Amino acid sequence: MKGTDAISILQEQHREVRKLLDELSSTTTRAEKTRARLLPELETRLRGHMRIEEEILYPAFREAAENEKEQQMFFEALDEHRAAEMELDELCKQEVTDVRFSAKAKVLKDMVEHHVQEEEKCLFPKLRELFTKDELSDLGTKMLERFQAVAGQHARPAAA
């Protein structure tokens, strides 16, 4: 990933997850191999992304938050993660050949899109106000290191 700025890292991860969700949600029940290949990658990237936000970024933001509205942003982001995680769990349990797979993938895509738009429109500008470039770089370094560790924990081989 380019640079270690926390916001740049998250934006790049947002692009990657969106691309995977676009591909996955556009498949049909006949695309069994494609779904079986995309789902583990999506799971690894999305779970890793959510973990670094929850463990590193969000606590730093909450600590720096200057008012109740910013505190509310913190809690809303966590709640959106919980909802996305539940939907991801359901998707991962679903047979890739089941017609319901597409519906679950679409719901997850919509949830992630909403969350990403809020982060990029509201949270990221606030982060730029609250943190210096060096602080964002330090957060980014920590986030990359943690993502690499977490992604390895969640990685599972794709179906052949």
Image (cartoon, rainbow, N blue to C red):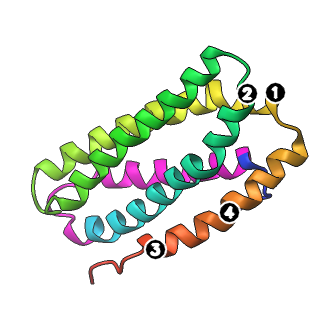
Residue 100 rendering spot, x and y as whole percentages: 12, 48
Extreme residue in the front direction: 63
Q: Quadrant of the C terminus?
A: bottom left
Q: Main secondary structure of the magenta part?
A: helix
Could you tell which of marks 4 and 1 lies nearer the N-terminus?
1
Mark 4 vs 2: CB contact within 8 A: no
The residue pinned by badge 1 equals: 129
Extreme residue in the top direction: 68
Q: Residues within 10 Å of mark 2 (few under 14, many from 20)?
A: few
Q: Secondary structure at mark 2?
A: helix
Q: CA distance from mark 2 to mark 1?
A: 6 Å
Q: Quadrant of the N terminus?
A: bottom right
Residue 54 rendering spot, x and y as whole percentages: 54, 47
Residue 64 rendering spot, x and y as whole percentages: 74, 31
Q: Secondary structure at mark 4?
A: helix
Q: In the rendering, which numbered label is found on residue 153?
A: 3
Q: In the rendering, which numbered label is found on residue 144?
A: 4
Q: Give the residue type at disc 4.
A: Leu
The magenta stretch is: 7-33
Let me know if residue 9 is in the magenta part.
yes
Extreme residue in the left direction: 98
Mark nearest the camera among 3 and 2 is 3
Could you tell which of marks 3 and 2 lies nearer the N-terminus?
2
Q: Give the residue type at disc 2.
A: Pro
Q: CA distance from mark 3 to mark 2?
A: 31 Å
